[in-house]
Image: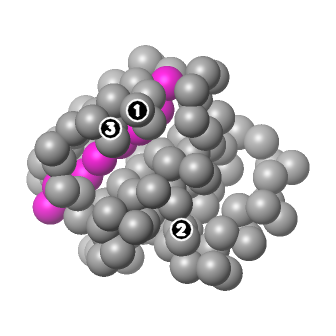
Amino acid sequence: MKLMITEDNGSIRELYSTYFKMTGFEVYSFETAEEALNSNVKPDIILTDYDMGHGMHGLDYAQIQRERFPKSTIVVNTGNIGLENELLQYHNKRIINEYAFKPVRPSQLKGLFGIN
């Protein structure tokens, strides 16, 4: 399964990449939404940060990816609990499948992917 990780924090990106590679995923990781959008990866699952510091934020990115890959599972991860209403709206519109609040263990994220 192809997993696209988009996360500006290098430590978190590396943690997620290592964990998901060890659990059998084909992992592609990117620092920015723009890098991910310019890649040729056709992901089964997209895990993205909400606030990537510069450039596009996670929900705009998720919306573009939803249009490109309507069958992909999209999970947004953020450290800002104040965004719950906005995330819920995107979830209800079926733009994102799930969302999680940092800190979150990679094993918890895997549970949000809808696979065992």
Q: Which mark is residue 36?
A: 3
Q: Is residue 4 left or right of residue 47?
A: left
Counting residues from the start of the chain, the first of labels 1 and 2 encountered is: 1
Please say if 60 is above or below 56: below
Instruction: Look at the image and tell me in which quarter the N terminus lies.
Output: bottom left
Q: Which amino acid does label 3 sit on?
A: Ala
Counting residues from the start of the chain, the first of labels 2 and 3 encountered is: 3
Other-residue count near label 2 (Cα within 10 Å), few / some / many at <14 / 14–19 / ≥20? many
Which percent across, then down, holds residue 33? 44, 36
Q: Are marks 3 and 1 in contact (CB under 8 Å)?
A: yes
Magenta span: predominant SS is: strand
The residue tagged 1 is 34
Pick whichever, 84 or 102, lies toward us: 84
Q: What residue do we see at 50% from left, 48% from top?
A: 61
Mark 1, secondary structure of its residue: helix
Magenta residues, as a range?
Answer: 1-8
Quarter of the figure with residue 85:
bottom right
- Marks 3/1: CA–CA distance: 5 Å
Mark 2, secondary structure of its residue: loop
Q: What residue do we see at 21% from left, 38% from top?
A: 39
The residue tagged 2 is 96
